[in-house]
Amino acid sequence: MADKKAYPLRISADVLDAVQRWSEDELRSVNAQIEYVLREALRKAGRIRPAEPADPKSGQGKSR
């Protein structure tokens, strides 16, 4: 698992409200929803590799 780093984020109230509603719909925390949205945008922009498929034996992604 990748190391996590804390990062303070300034965000407008209306954007935060929308993310909170979206995260509730997706059954994620706000933090997890923001990370998901950022990761998807980075993947689509070709900035990070796509997620590797889960290993059915271990239930986790492949090791590097």
Image: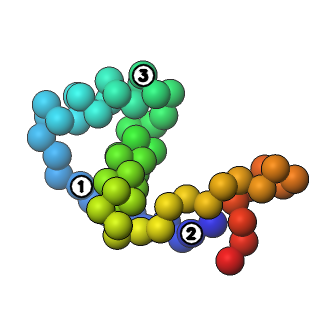
> Where is residue 8 shown, x and y percent of the image?
27, 59
Q: Earlier in the sequence, mark 1 or mark 2?
A: 2
Type of amino acid under label 3: Asp
Q: CA distance from mark 3 to mark 1?
A: 22 Å
Horizontal relation, residue 50 to residue 11: left or right: right
Dividing the image into 4 quarters, which one contains the C terminus? bottom right
Q: Residue at x 62, y 61 (%)?
A: 52
Q: Residue at x 69, y 59 (%)?
A: 61
Q: Earlier in the sequence, mark 2 or mark 3?
A: 2
> Where is residue 21 shown, x and y percent of the image?
32, 24
Q: Which residue is mark 2?
A: 2
Quarter location, residue 18: top left
Considering depth in this image, is 38 or 28 the residue closer to the camera?
38
56 w.r.t. 46: above or below: above
Q: Residue at x 77, y 56 (%)?
A: 55
**Element marked by disc 3:** helix
For the question of whether residue 31 can be seen, the reply is no
> Where is residue 35 shown, x and y percent of the image?
40, 51
**Which of the labelled discs sits on residue 32, or is there none?**
none
**Element marked by disc 2:** loop
